[in-house]
Image: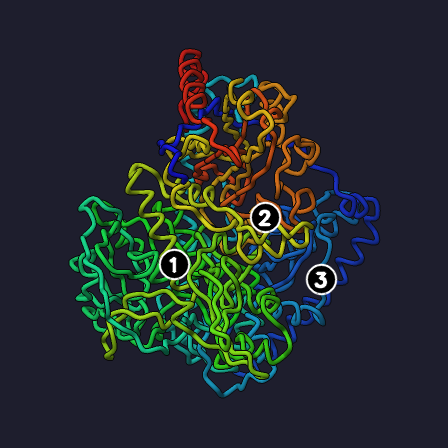
Amino acid sequence: MPEAQHPHEHLPLPLLVRAPKRNAPVPRRIQQYEQNLQNRAGHSHQIGEGISRRIERWSEILAERAAAGLPELEPGMPLILRTEPGSDIDFFRSAFQFEVVAELEGGYAIVASGDNDLQALQAKLEAFAAGTGKQVAKLYEIVPDDENVEERLRRILSPKLLEIWARIDDNQTYKVQVSVSFGGSLVMPKLEAQKPDETDEHYTDYLQRLEVRSLDYFRKLEDEKWARQDEVEELVGEYGGTIDSAFIEEIDSFTFLTSVSGKALRDLVLNYKFLFGVAEPDVSGANEAENPGDDDDLPEVLPPEPSAARIAVLDSGIQEGHPLIEPALEPQHSLCLSPGCAPNDVGDAYNHGTRVAGASLYPGGVGNGQVKLHSRIINIKVLDNQGMISDGQLGGDYIEEAASHATALEPKARILNHSVADPNGGYSGVHMSQWAAAIDRVSYEKDVLVVQAAGNIWRDTQSGNRSVTHHLAAGVGYPDYLLLDESRVSNPAQALQALTVGSVCMAGWTDGIDSTFGQEHEPSAFSATGLGMWRTVKPEVVVPSGDFVYDTGQQPSVKVRREASMRLPRSTHNGGTLVDADDVGTSFAAPLVSSLAGRILNEYPQLSMQHVRALIGLSARWPDWCEAANTPEARLKVLRHIGFGIPDFERAIRSSDSSVTLLSGELENIGMREAHLYQIPIPETIREIAWERNMRIDVSMSYVALPRATRRQHRGYLSTWLDWVSKRQNESIEEFRGRILDLAENDEDEGLFADQDLPWTIRERSNWGDVAGVGRNYGTLQRDWCFLKGIDLPDNLCFAVIGHKGWDKTGRYRAKYALGVSFECLGGEVDLYSPMHLAVENLQVTLQAQQIVVPGN
């Protein structure tokens, strides 16, 4: 912030109205469904042949299994079916009595029958062929058996297991993590909107009855979970295998580690009808240190205030007696969650967690002089002394335990720094991993912010193709190799509700022989990139934390040099110095953002973590080099490298004279087919003083919802999904409200919001904005910005947050969000804050007097 600017607290964002639920939309007409209805005979023949082939092949499989001495399975078979993409796949259960196991892409789903001859489907098919019923028209295909095995393997196995599948040895033991669904045969009660002629008393009675039915549904879901886990334990035992971990539980699935023979693994994958995912065990890793350090000019450290925000560091432990960390550490709350270590072993033999904790305390690196710390540190050791997830442990297990421990403290540690990720390549699974789903779940249930490292590309070939030296030797230069598939963010950085952090260079450097790959604020040579799952923006933000360097020889060697690295505290468990600049990686970028989150909480301790996440996103900007990206394709590359940009401490913490941030109040919750409208008055004086000046408008919404790992895309994975839209310039507030309520009912009606006056950069759909292939509502941190002349500002800017139906039909698991909007006058010191402050105060008084704002649910 320039010295002439005066710091101000952020302003409240006036909530105009919470609009109630409306009736469900009229179903849209679907061409293939209509064609199937018109051609009942042809469609019946196609589906009938698929049924016959599947029954015949399943009979052969059962005979082969019996001859091989494999355990007997309960009646029923796995199938892959296809319907209209985007449809509610629960109709497979209601129409044909299948248990829905998991949603796949392209309208495909894995289902399980309850018998070996598909009686319910055959009965519906006979009726359909005779001219009765329509449900069979929505079943487009039963994947044929010659394709079923290949499709099942491709959609269930991780890429690494799929690669070695043909070489699986029947007699060798394999350790894998297995994901199993449950509850797919249960009917979830559906929340209906109040009818126009329905009395409040009658609707209240309906809601009470719905609550009873919902409680019964979730009780039965719990019973099915226990029964399915008992079934799995018995089956693995009959295979002669072992279950090597706890069950990591989601709303309708669980994941566990198991050791089984290759023969048993093949049978599980191909024939256990409730299985939907198999992958190798979770691993972790970090770049190794290499430079000698120094302990010259260590700073004088002042401890943080007793009320300072707490940051829980989930890592390899911390050297608790380290003089640069000890003043901020609370050792009475330290915890070891690694089964590979003694319960009281919270130290850092691997020399990673100490650096991470240090980066959160010294975000500019360790300097000299006097330093005041701003956060308290909670040490939660989740990796063993080799820096690995212990054998017999899944990432989702310790995420749950760590979050519970951190939030049981008073006050809570609501910032969880997780600089741990799979080092073996970008995540490419079909469904969200249990590791990432656990992050999403605790984010919703416990109001924590998980700050997650994006993952690294290694220096050399120790990690196969995911190394800089490999790419350079193959002729793929910097930064092009960062956009390869194997350079995508690492598991669990794809978690939708984490704040994923990448790295950019601190500065360009060369000594004439060695040089950094990038210049100031260009992508670090090691930083994994997006997009994330389902084309979400990952990483969302980046921070300057260092770069690899290379020499200029014909065969360049890649190095770590202190001139391009942060000077951080390090563990002296194995000797060495207290401070060093001998390592780089997104592991040390993430805690810089955790530090910023802590500083925000120090200023505004009442904020939810969604407010904190929204403010960090709102403060982020693309650096100057991005201005050269002047096509949608070029901007997509920028977005993949650096997300929404580099957060700014001053902008996140305070408004200024010429930059005003407005933030929604308490953490709002919103359900499907509901809308919240916000109004920002723009005083005439602002248009006058900013007449020909360029104005920048930024919007950032952060939300959380309960995940469901058996479903795909944000619309199926989240219990309720949200987006935001803005009022058109020539649209009245009442017209805007009516359009928004229509939009809440009709998710697919693009005409309701395709015509926008404000030139947003990303926009709601992937083909509307100035960035190719990305829509801002794909993720849970929805960020956008535009530029206007001051004269073009409307009298009022209005925004709406809209709730849409996800997987939850009961209305129990509502989304929770925070919304931030900022205005900035570019290129001049103009006082926007004073007139905006007065206008917002006057509007709030008016709204309160008119009693437009109503209590939330």
> What residue sits 34% from the left and 56% below the top?
363
Dot placed on the residue nearer the N-terminal end, 1 or 2: 2
> What residue sits 50% from the left and 56% below the top?
539
Query: Residue tagged by mark 1?
Result: 226
**What's the amino acid at mark 1?**
Trp
**What's the amino acid at mark 2?**
Asp
Of circles 1 and 3, the one toward us is 1
Residue 707 % position (x, y): 47, 50
> What residue sits 53% from the left and 86% below the top?
169
- 53 is higher (above) or lower (below) than 663: below
Query: Residue tagged by mark 3?
Result: 51
- 826 is higher (above) or lower (below) than 185: above
Residue 10 % position (x, y): 38, 32
SS for dot 1? helix
Q: Classify residue 528 as left or right of residue 137.
A: left
Dot placed on the residue nearer the N-terminal end, 1 or 3: 3
